[in-house]
Amino acid sequence: MKIKEILLTEAECPPATQDIELNTRNRNDTIKNYMYGPLNIDHPGDYWSKGAKLWDTPEETVKQSLCGNCVAFDISPRMEACMPGKVSDEHGELGYCWMHHFKCHSARTCETWAKGGPITDDKVSLDWGRRANMNETATPGSTSAGNMATVVNPHVAVGKMGKSYTGSPGVSGTKAPKPPKPKKQKPTDNALDMKNTSIFGGPLKRI
């Protein structure tokens, strides 16, 4: 088996394709926040007219801007294998939306539609999957790695309320030394007269 075939075989399916509750939650969020619809394709009501008003364009144009030709609509062979059952009907087919992370129908649309789809190649599908996973590492309300503060010497850290310890996290130990007080600068101080002010560790020199 070629390396490419191994990668495609071992690639994981998006969680929402395997979890009906997650899929339903993401779909309902998209209905609420991004006007995913229409609910009933045979009886759309005023859905298309609302879309025409939103985008300030004729209804016929809106009806041509569907999930089925959206850049994030995935109907690649690997994604079809992730679907739990039949993926097509008389109106179109079921695919995966990488923008909102749920199984959506090709005959519907939403406010975030973007030209360029559908995704039919496994390599393109995997690329969308990698980027989606990278963006989802920090869930809403949590702290991503880029926003976490660091401590220069974590084994000797000064805590709050005068409590500071050395040793392993969560284990009481010797009280850490107080942080040094910064030297007060006078208006007459000159960086050229101060030691070790160069970024290279030595004194600056007058020219």
Image (cartoon, rainbow, N blue to C red):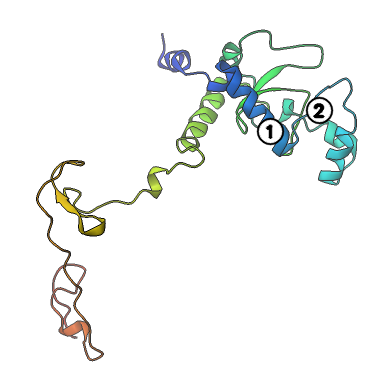
- The answer, for residue 112, to whether it is visible in the render is no
Would you name the residue on which mark 1 appears?
A: 30
Q: Do labels 2 and 1 touch, CB within 8 Å? A: no
Q: Residue furthest bottom?
A: 188
Residue 134 lies, in percent from the top left, at: 46, 35
Neighbourhood count class around disc 2 (C-alpha, 10 Å): few under 14, some 14–19, many 20 upward: some
Question: Quadrant of the rendered structure where residue 32 is?
Answer: top right
Q: Is residue 50 above or below residue 179?
A: above
Residue 61 lies, in percent from the top left, at: 86, 36
Tell me the distance, in whole angstroms, between the alpha carbons under discs 2 and 1: 12 Å
Residue sitting at 79 percent across and 33 percent down? 65
Residue sitting at 40 percent across and 16 percent down? 3
Identify the secondary structure beneath mark 1: helix
Would you name the residue on which mark 2 appears?
A: 38
- Which quarter of the figure is the C terminus placed in? bottom left
Q: Residue furthest left?
A: 174
Residue 100 lies, in percent from the top left, at: 62, 32
Residue 153 is left or right of residue 132, and the answer is: left
Identify the secondary structure beneath mark 2: loop
Question: Which amino acid type is marked by label 2?
Answer: Pro
Q: Is residue 164 above or below residue 103?
A: below
- Which quarter of the figure is the N terminus placed in? top left
Q: Is residue 165 above or below residue 190?
A: above
Neighbourhood count class around disc 1 (C-alpha, 10 Å): few under 14, some 14–19, many 20 upward: many
Numbered marks: total: 2
Question: Which amino acid type is marked by label 1?
Answer: Thr
First in residue order: circle 2 vs circle 1: 1
Residue sitting at 13 percent across and 77 percent down? 195
Mark number, residue 6: none
In-front residue for pair 85/65: 85
In-front residue for pair 46/134: 46
